[in-house]
C-alpha cells in the first residue's frame, strides 16, 4: 500500500493541540453546570483511630449547607471492589466502604461529605462536624507492618500479609544455587511515589429524576469500567442507569483509572438534593485521596557460573498496598514478578510475592505497574553481578541475553516473548552514548572535582494484554469520518494517532476524522487506557474497521460510478476510477441514495492473543558533586524496540515523559510517612517533582522488531520510559559512587542528602 | 462583597467578590475563562500563570481586590483572532504538550521569558527560567525546544509584537 501523507508513520502535529494551546481545553473542573453545588470531603487526620460523629446538626444548619453524608447514611451502598486478584491467589478482600465506618485506617480516609452552595461554605461547615477520634497504634509502612506484634490493619489478615504466593521452581533453583561459582545478592527499596498529574481528580454528579438516570463526569482512563463498578457494585443499579462522561483529562499515569469514593458520593448527593454536585480535589488532597505508586521492598539473588552466566535467580517481593485494596493493588506486584527474569536467559527461577497492608494511603498501578519495579531489581542485580565478577556491565548483559534465535522464548514466569533483539538495542545504545569515550569524560570530571558515572538498563516489559476493544469508523453526511473507541486519552494524543490509522486507509486530512471517547452512551463498549494498550489494541481495531469501511465505500462507489470495484482507487478524499478523473467524493457517497447507515459504518473488534513485549536499553550518565551530594544527569541515550512507529513525534513524547518520571523517582520523589503514619510529604512544597532544570535532553531512537501479536506489529510505548529509566539512573549514580568511594548500594531517591551521607559513611569527602 | 473592575484580554470585566477571592478564581469562576488552570495550592506549579500589566504572575497568589484597574492577559487573549501567537504555534509544532493542563501557564511564562531575556535563548536559560512551572507529561524536552523556537519566531512576528505592546500598555 502506498504511503499516505497523513497516515501511519508520519510525525503529524496533534489535532487536539489547537484547543489546549488556546485555553479551550475542557477538563472536569472547567464544566460549570447550572445550579451546581459544591462538595467537600472531610478526611481523617489520624492514620488509625476509632471515631464517632456525635453531632451533625450544627454543620447541617450552617449557611448554604444542603447535605451532610456520613457512613450511616450510606448503608444501602455497596463497597468499592478490588478486581485485581491474581488467578492463582486466594485472599481475603477487606471492606473498602464509600465512607469510613467506626475506624479510619489512613490519614485522609474519608469520613464525611458536606455539600453546600459554595465550596467555602462546605469547608466551613465541615469544621462544625463533631468527630471524636480515639487514636490507635498505627503500622506506618511495610517494615513496621511486618514487625512482630505490629498493629493489625484488618482483623482477618493476620500479620498484615494479604497474600503469600510463589512462581517458579524452588527445588531446581536451590540446587542451582548450591553449585554456583558465585552468588550475588541485593536488597532494594522501590520508593513510594505519588502520580501528581497536573489536573487533580474531580467529579460532577447529576441525577435526572424523570428518567431515573445518573450522570458522572470525571477525568478517567475509561468510562465503561467505572460505569460498571459504580452502577452494579456500589449504587446497585442497572448499568444503563448510569452515564459516565470523561472530558479532557490532565494526565492519568494509571492512577486515574480506578473507581474512587468521590464518584458514588457525588451521585448519591446529587440524587438527594436534586442538583448537580461538584467535587474537585486540591493538591494536598490528591496526596491522600488518590492511590499511590510502587512501594516495594525486595531481596534478589543471582547464582552465576565462573564465566558469568546466570544459572538461577531468586526474588522475594514485599509489595505495600496501604490500608485498603485499591482496584488492581494485589495484581501489581504479581505482574512485576511475572517479568522478573527480564531480557535474560536464566537456568531456573523462584519468586515469592507477598502484599502487605499498613496504615497508609492505598497503593495501586502507576505508570508501568510492577514492571518498573521488576526492571529496577533485575538491572540493579545485574550491575552488582558485573561488579562482583569484575566484568564490564555491557558484557555480562550480552552474555546472558535471550537471543533472537531463541524466539519465541518461554520465560520461567510463564510468558512468551514473541520477538526482540536485546543485544542489538544494547549495542546501538552504547554507540549513541559514546560508551567507549566514557573513561576520558570521567577523567576530565575527576580533574574538576566531580564523580562521573554511567549506568545501563536493558529492560523488557509487557503491554496490551487481556481484553480487546470493539469500536467503529463511520462516514458522516458531511463527508467527514467519526471513530468511536472505548479507550481514553489522558494526554497521549489519541485523536491524532487514531486518525492517522483511518487516514492511512481513507486518505483524508486528520482534521476530517473525529474521535468520540469518554462517553458511555456514545461509545457502547470499551476497556479504557492502561497497560500501554490503547495504540496496540485500539489502533489494531481501527485498522480492521478501516479496511471493512474501505470495502463498503468502494462497493458504494462502484454502484455510483458503475465501474468494477477492482478499477477503483482511493485518492485525496475520494474514490476514483484508476487512471481517470472520474471520481466520487466521500461527501457524495454519504449523500447518495444508495448509501445506508449500515453501509457507511464499519464495526470491528481486536482481542490481543498475547501481550506485546517492548524492550530496549537506556544509558544514563551522571555527574555527582561529592562535596554537596548533588547529582546532575549529563547524558541520556536510549534505543527502544516498539515494534512499529505510528507517529514518531508522539512516540518520543511518551518516552520522554516516562523517563522524566523515572528520573524523578530515582533522584527526587519520595512519599514519607512518619512513625505514626502521618504523611509528611503532602504538598508540592514537600514532595519534590522534577522541574525543567532537573532533567536533561533525551537522545532517543527506535530499533523496531515488529510484534507478531497484532496486525500492525505495534508494541505499547506509554510506560516503557518509566521502566528503563530509574535503574539506568541508579546504576549510573552507584557507578560514580563506586568509582570514587567504593559504594555499592544506595536506595532511591538518590537525594543530595542521601549521597552526602553515603560518602560520609564511606570515609568522607576526599 | 466588594466591587472589582479590570481589563481582561482587552475587555472590561467587573463584579462583586468576597474579599478572599483570588485572581484565578475571578478569571475562572466569574469570567468563565477556564484556560487558566489551578494545579496546586502552594503556588508551586504555574498552571495559573497570566500576565498582569505585561508581567507573568501566578494568579493563585493574588487577591483579586489587589488587581483593581489592572490590565490582565490570559491564554485566551494571546492569539490574534484566528492567528496563533508564535509561542502557541511553537508548542504545537514541537509537541511541547501532552495533556495540556500545564500548557496555558507554560506558554504565558514562556512569553514572559522572551520579554525579559530576548529572542535567543539557550537551553540552560530556558530550563532555569521555567523553574516555576511544572509539567508531569513531557519530561520538558519538547517544551524547551518549543520555547526556544517560539522565542525566535516572536522576533519578527507582527501579531506577537502587537500583543506584547497591548499587554504592556
Image (cartoon, helix red, strand yellow):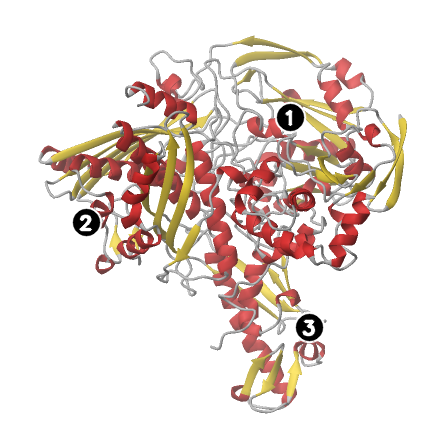
Image coords of residue A680 (percent x, y) = 53, 20
Q: Residues within 10 Å of mark 2 (few under 14, many from 20)?
A: some
Q: CA distance from mark 3 to mark 1?
A: 50 Å
**Residue at point 75% right, 24% down?**
A122
Q: CA distance from mark 2 to mark 3?
A: 57 Å
Sequence order check: which comes first, mark 3 or mark 1? 1
Q: Quadrant of residue A351?
A: top left
Q: Residues within 10 Å of mark 1 (few under 14, many from 20)?
A: some
Q: Nearer the viewer, residue A765 or B12?
A: A765
Q: Which mark is residue A521?
A: none
Which of the image's four quarters has the C terminus of chain A? top left
**Residue at point 42% right, 52% down?**
A699
Mark 1: secondary structure = helix
**Residue at point 70% right, 58% down?**
B156
Q: Is residue A145 visible?
A: yes
Image coords of residue A553 (percent x, y) = 60, 77
Q: Nearer the viewer, residue A468 or B90?
A: B90
* Vertical side of B1 occupied by A349: above or below: below
Q: Is residue A62 left or right of residue A200?
A: right
* Vertical side of A282 occupied by A692: above or below: below
Query: Disc 2 marks which residue?
Result: A399
Image coords of residue B59 (percent x, y) = 73, 34
Q: Which mark is residue A74?
A: 1
Q: Are marks 3 and 1 on the same chain?
A: yes
Q: Residues within 10 Å of mark 3 (few under 14, many from 20)?
A: some
Query: Disc 3 marks which residue?
Result: A479
Q: Are the residues tagged 3 and 1 within 8 Å (C-beta)? A: no
Q: Quadrant of residue A57?
A: top right
Q: Is residue A338 visible?
A: no
> In the rendered structure, the residue with mark 2 lies on which chain?
A
Amino acid at each position: 500500500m502506498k504511503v499516505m501523507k497523513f497516515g501511519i508513520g508520519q510525525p503529524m502535529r496533534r489535532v487536539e493541540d489547537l484547543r489546549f494551546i488556546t485555553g479551550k481545553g475542557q477538563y472536569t473542573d472547567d464544566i460549570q453546570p447550572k445550579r451546581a453545588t459544591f462538595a467537600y470531603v472531610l478526611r481523617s487526620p489520624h492514620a488509625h483511630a476509632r471515631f464517632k460523629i456525635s453531632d451533625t446538626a450544627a454543620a447541617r444548619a450552617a449557611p448554604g449547607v444542603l447535605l451532610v453524608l456520613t457512613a450511616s447514611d450510606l448503608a444501602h451502598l455497596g463497597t468499592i471492589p478490588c478486581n485485581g486478584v491474581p488467578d492463582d491467589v486466594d485472599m481475603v478482600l477487606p471492606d473498602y466502604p464509600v465512607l469510613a465506618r467506626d475506624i479510619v485506617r489512613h490519614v485522609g480516609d474519608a469520613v464525611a461529605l458536606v455539600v453546600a452552595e459554595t465550596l467555602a461554605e462546605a469547608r466551613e461547615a465541615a469544621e462544625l462536624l463533631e468527630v471524636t477520634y480515639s487514636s490507635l497504634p498505627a503500622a506506618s509502612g511495610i517494615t513496621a507492618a511486618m514487625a512482630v506484634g505490629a498493629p493489625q490493619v484488618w482483623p482477618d489478615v493476620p500479620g498484615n500479609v494479604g497474600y503469600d504466593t510463589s512462581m517458579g521452581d524452588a527445588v531446581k533453583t536451590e540446587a542451582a544455587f548450591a553449585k554456583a561459582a558465585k552468588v550475588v545478592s541485593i536488597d532494594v527499596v522501590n520508593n513510594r511515589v505519588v502520580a501528581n498529574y497536573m489536573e487533580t481528580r474531580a467529579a460532577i454528579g447529576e441525577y435526572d429524576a424523570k428518567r431515573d438516570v445518573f450522570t458522572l463526569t470525571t477525568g478517567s482512563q475509561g468510562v465503561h469500567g467505572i460505569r460498571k463498578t459504580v452502577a452494579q457494585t456500589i449504587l446497585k443499579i442497572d448499568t444503563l442507569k448510569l452515564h459516565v462522561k470523561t472530558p479532557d483529562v490532565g494526565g492519568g499515569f494509571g492512577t486515574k483509572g480506578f473507581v474512587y469514593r468521590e464518584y458514588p458520593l457525588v451521585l448519591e448527593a446529587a440524587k438527594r438534593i436534586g442538583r448537580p454536585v461538584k467535587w474537585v480535589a486540591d493538591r494536598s488532597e490528591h496526596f491522600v485521596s488518590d492511590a499511590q505508586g510502587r512501594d516495594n521492598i525486595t531481596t534478589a539473588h543471582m547464582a552465576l557460573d565462573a564465566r558469568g552466566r546466570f544459572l538461577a535467580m531468586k526474588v522475594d517481593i514485599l509489595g505495600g498496598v496501604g490500608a485498603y485494596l485499591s482496584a488492581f493493588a494485589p495484581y501489581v506486584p504479581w505482574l512485576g514478578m511475572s517479568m522478573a527474569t527480564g531480557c535474560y536467559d536464566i537456568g531456573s527461577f523462584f519468586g515469592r510475592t507477598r502484599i502487605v497492608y499498613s496504615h497508609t494511603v492505598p497503593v495501586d498501578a502507576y505508570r508501568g505497574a510492577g514492571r518498573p519495579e521488576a526492571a529496577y531489581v533485575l538491572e540493579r542485580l545485574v550491575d552488582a553481578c558485573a561488579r562482583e565478577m569484575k566484568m564490564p556491565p555491557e558484557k555480562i548483559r550480552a552474555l546472558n541475553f535471550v537471543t533472537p534465535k531463541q524466539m519465541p522464548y518461554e520465560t520461567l514466569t510463564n510468558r512468551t516473548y514473541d520477538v526482540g533483539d536485546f543485544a542489538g538495542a544494547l549495542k546501538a545504545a552504547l554507540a549513541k552514548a559514546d560508551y567507549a569515550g566514557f573513561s576520558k569524560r570521567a577523567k576530565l570530571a575527576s580533574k574538576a572535582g566531580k564523580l562521573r558515572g554511567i549506568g545501563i538498563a536493558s529492560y523488557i516489559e509487557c503491554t496490551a494484554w487481556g481484553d480487546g476493544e470493539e469500536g467503529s469508523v463511520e462516514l458522516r453526511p458531511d463527508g467527514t469520518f467519526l471513530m468511536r473507541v472505548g479507550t481514553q486519552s489522558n494526554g497521549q494524543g489519541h485523536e491524532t494517532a487514531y486518525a492517522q490509522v483511518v487516514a492511512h486507509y481513507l486518505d483524508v486530512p486528520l482534521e476530517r476524522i473525529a474521535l468520540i471517547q469518554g462517553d458511555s452512551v456514545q461509545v457502547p463498549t470499551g476497556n479504557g487506557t492502561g497497560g500501554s494498550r490503547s495504540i496496540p489494541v485500539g489502533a489494531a481495531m481501527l485498522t480492521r474497521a478501516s479496511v471493512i469501511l474501505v470495502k463498503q465505500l468502494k462497493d458504494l462507489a462502484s454502484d455510483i460510478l458503475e465501474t468494477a470495484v477492482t478499477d477503483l482507487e482511493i485518492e485525496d478524499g475520494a474514490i476514483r476510477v484508476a487512471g481517470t478523473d472520474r471520481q466520487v467524493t466521500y461527501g457524495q457517497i454519504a449523500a447518495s441514495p444508495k448509501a445506508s447507515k449500515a453501509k457507511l459504518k464499519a464495526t470491528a473488534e481486536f482481542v490481543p492473543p498475547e501481550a506485546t513485549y517492548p524492550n530496549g536499553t537506556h544509558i544514563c550518565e551522571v555527574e555527582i558533586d561529592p562535596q554537596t551530594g548533588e547529582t546532575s544527569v549529563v547524558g541520556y541515550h536510549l534505543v527502544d524496540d516498539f515494534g512499529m512507529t505510528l507517529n514518531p513525534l508522539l512516540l518520543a513524547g511518551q518516552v520522554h515523559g516516562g523517563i522524566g518520571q523515572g528520573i524523578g523517582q530515582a533522584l527526587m520523589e519520595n512519599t514519607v510517612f512518619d512513625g505514626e503514619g502521618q504523611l509528611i510529604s503532602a504538598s508540592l512544597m514537600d514532595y519534590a517533582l522534577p522541574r525543567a532544570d532537573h532533567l536533561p535532553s533525551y537522545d532517543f531512537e527506535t530499533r523496531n522488531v515488529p510484534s507478531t501479536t497484532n496486525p500492525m506489529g505495534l508494541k505499547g510505548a506509554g510506560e516503557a520510559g518509566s521502566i528503563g529509566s530509574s535503574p539506568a539512573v541508579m546504576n549510573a549514580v552507584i557507578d560514580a559512587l563506586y568509582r570514587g568511594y567504593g559504594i555499592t548500594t544506595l536506595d532511591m531517591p538518590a537525594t543530595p542528602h542521601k549521597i552526602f551521607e553515603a560518602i560520609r559513611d564511606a570515609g568522607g569527602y576526599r | 462583597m466588594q466591587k472589582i473592575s479590570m481589563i481582561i484580554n482587552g475587555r472590561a470585566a467587573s463584579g462583586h467578590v468576597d474579599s478572599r477571592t483570588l485572581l484565578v478564581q475571578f478569571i475562572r469562576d466569574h469570567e468563565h475563562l477556564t484556560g487558566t488552570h489551578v494545579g496546586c495550592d502552594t503556588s508551586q506549579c504555574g498552571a495559573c500563570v497570566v500576565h498582569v500589566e505585561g508581567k507573568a504572575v501566578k494568579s493563585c497568589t493574588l487577591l483579586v481586590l489587589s488587581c483593581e484597574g489592572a490590565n490582565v492577559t490570559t491564554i485566551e487573549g494571546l492569539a490574534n483572532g484566528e492567528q496563533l501567537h508564535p509561542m502557541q504555534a511553537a508548542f504545537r509544532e514541537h509537541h511541547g504538550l501532552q495533556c495540556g493542563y500545564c500548557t496555558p501557564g507554560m506558554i504565558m511564562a514562556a512569553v514572559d521569558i522572551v520579554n525579559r531575556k530576548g529572542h535567543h535563548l539557550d537551553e540552560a536559560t530556558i530550563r532555569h527560567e521555567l523553574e516555576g512551572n511544572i509539567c508531569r507529561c513531557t519530561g520538558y524536552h519538547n517544551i524547551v525546544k518549543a520555547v526556544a523556537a517560539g522565542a525566535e519566531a516572536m522576533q519578527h512576528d507582527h501579531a506577537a509584537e502587537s500583543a506584547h505592546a497591548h499587554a504592556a500598555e
